[in-house]
Amino acid sequence: MNVAEAVGRTLAALGADHVFGVVGSGNFHVTNALVAAGARFVAARHEGGAATMADAYARTSGRIGVLSVHQGCGLTNALTGITEAAKSRTPLVVLAAETGATAIRSNFRIDQDALALAVGARSERVRSAATAVDDVVRAFRLASEDRRTVVLNLPLDVQAAELPGGLPAPVLPALHPVAPSAAGVRALADELRRAERPVFIAGRGARHAAAELRELAETCGALLATSAVARGLFHDDPWSLDVSGGFATPLAAELISGADLIVGWGATLNTWTTRHGALVGPGCTVVQVDLDSDAIGAHRPVHLGVLGDVALTAEAVRAELAGQRLSGYRDASIRERIARGGSWLQIPYQDESTSDTIDPRTLTAALDRMLPTERVVAVDSGNFMGYPSTFLRVPDHHGFCFTQAFQSIGLGLATAIGAALARPDRLPVAALGDGGALMGISELETAVRLGLPLVIVVYDDHAYGAEVHHFGPDGHPLGTVRFPDTDLAAAARGFGCTGITVRGEADLEAVRDWLAGPRSAPLLIDAKVTSAEGSWWLVQAFRGH
């Protein structure tokens, strides 16, 4: 057995069940070894798409993502997706072939260590046949236990080397979650006792702790909110404000800014989650609970930082408050206000549809009524992104995949494919702008080939809308960010999708027809949307530019 086969078999034994990638000569054997050991290989049409699929699969499934790429150009093609994953602390192992030690003149030779480190990923290497299994286990542990994106370099000469003896079984002893200190627990409990209007904001690091946070919030009377990436975590709770930040409803913004205590649970409380600090009211005490000490106070000063696993910390604080029931921010009037105005779908608006364009709010609300509630929504970046992120309901936090840490457009379609494979029991929905759709259009072939029942909604304003609404009001020329109308529905049909064009709500009847059918090919909705003004969330975002 050579090292390439050993690497693939070891990863499969550790639990890697899907691998995404584009196969070249350098990663051919290791990919085939993974498949032979039982993993499913998903061939993308571009390494960037493959990286984002692996990222979304990991986020949505709760398993380790695996990406397989060729040396040099395969890795550079995947770099934007790897950067997104690294910034999001996605547990992802990137199997990156690498030129051998003596191939210093190879066209494929680049400094792959420096490349990984530059974008925030960890760089590891399979060093020899004798250490191959241990090297893979180390990379897998870094990804799983430290929630890191790890580039595991596989030099070609090492891949070809024979293992000395048989393949040892990989050993990955379980690590216990980090428990908070007793002093930290007491200090947080004291803050909750003093608070009259506490709000919990749960982030990516709290996605495993919904039950514990709900129980603690009930004990101390806290209202519940999430960052965008954790949307859906408290979806059915009567005290949930949904998302904090740019996507927050007017009621959520009012109640969060009125808090006298905000506790960020596995949330960095960055500029987006706090609306550039505007949601942190005067005199409000801010607490952060996180596994990562570097995250505490990274975006704003905090009064108290507690280092520890979110679930363990919430349980410990609730035990400290045993026998006490604090009313906090919860009373009948607040509950009634949340029931009446806690969702954007409940807020009246002036429909701005025209004879040949549809208001994106009208479009999204209509789709929300049509599509099954068991769905997983993936959203690309752009002016449009607030509409699907707020008007499309999700059943829980596994129903929303938001690859936005790097704010790159063009990741949305690949995100939806990865999420769809992680949750085949749900209808996948991709929400894209026309710019991002055209950037990632090659992965339409992947979606068709996989037979995914995918709904792709393109909010088509024939432009890079964020730039139009950023620079247009100041009178700048916009020829560089406006484009001719493109028939994206026809392009989708060319790939084998069902493609429809929507200019008004009546055109959405074709969606009902698709939903009633076999759903054997993706549906692309080319929605020609109104774009006279920027979205409400974009106004907030521009304050950070």
Image: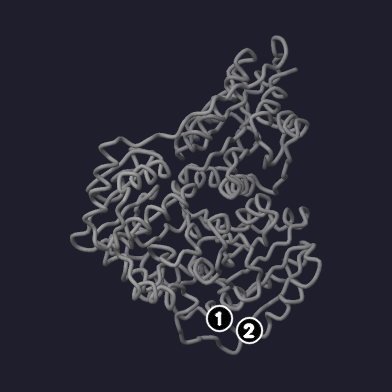
Q: Position of residue 212 (x, y in %)?
A: 43, 49
User: What is the three-letter code of the residue carrying label 2?
Assistant: Glu
Q: Residue 505: which numbered mark, if any?
A: 2
Q: Nearer the viewer, residue 230 or 521?
A: 230
Instruction: In the displayed orientation, state which residue is furthest to the left.
Output: 283
Examine the rendered structure and indicate whether residue 544 appears above or below residue 141.
below
Q: How packed is label 2: few (under 14 Cα within 10 Å), some, or many (20 or more)?
A: some
Location of residue 491 (image quadrant): bottom right
Colour mode?
A: one colour
Quarter of the figure that contains the N terminus: top right
Q: Earlier in the sequence, mark 1 or mark 2?
A: 1
Location of residue 220 (image quadrant): bottom left
Q: Nearer the viewer, residue 493 or 524?
A: 524
Location of residue 151 (image quadrant): top right
Q: Image check: 309 left or right of 403?
A: left
Q: Position of residue 90 (x, y in %)?
A: 52, 43
Q: Image check: 10 left or right of 496?
A: left
Q: Position of residue 162 (x, y in %)?
A: 72, 14
Rounded to the nearest angstrom, the CA distance separating label 1 from label 2 is 8 Å
Q: Position of residue 310 (x, y in %)?
A: 40, 44
Instruction: Tell me the element at label 2.
Output: helix
Residue 111 visible (yes or no)? no
Asked if labels 2 and 1 touch by Cβ distance under 8 angstroms, the answer is: yes
Q: Residue 362: which numbered mark, if any?
A: 1
Examine the rendered structure and indicate whether residue 15 appears above or below residue 131.
below
